[in-house]
Image (spheres, grey):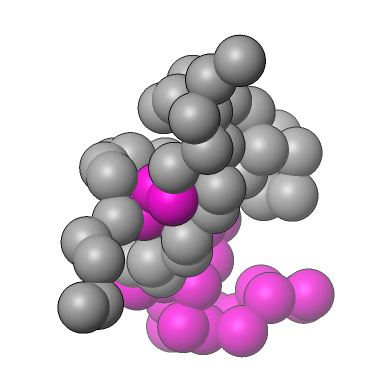
Amino acid sequence: MSKITNFEVALYNKEVRRLVEDGSRHRHLTDDWAETHYIVVSASDEHEARIKIGAKYPEHNGFVIEQVVPAQDDH
């Protein structure tokens, strides 16, 4: 059994980024999705973290994962 680890995933939405650059707005997402968001997800490895994030923020909806790294412990 694999140990569960928190991973920090950096992602943005390429459709929102393009629209904001053109001075437009996305119909469903806020403009802040043009910038990188950092989301923590618990998973057994980086691959599983990507799968979990991809299920919630799918590539076919314009989401781009920039980086997946082990989350830094706040302690």
Residue 15 percent across, percent down from the top left: 54, 55
For residue 38, side relative to residue 19 (left or right): left
* Residue 59 appears anywhere in the view: no
Residue 4 within the magenta-colored segment of the rendering: no
Vertical placement of 55 versus 26: above or below? above
Vertical placement of 66 versus 24: above or below? above
The span shown in magenta is: 6-35
Residue at figure coordinates x 46%, y 83% from the top left: 32
Residue 20 percent across, percent down from the top left: 43, 76
Q: As rendered, which of 31 and 40 lies closer to the eye?
A: 40
Residue at figure coordinates x 49%, y 72% from the top left: 33
* Residue 57 appears anywhere in the view: yes
Residue 70 percent across, percent down from the top left: 28, 45
Residue at figure coordinates x 21%, y 78% from the top left: 75
Q: As rendered, which of 34 and 66 lies closer to the eye?
A: 66
Q: Quadrant of the N terminus?
A: top right
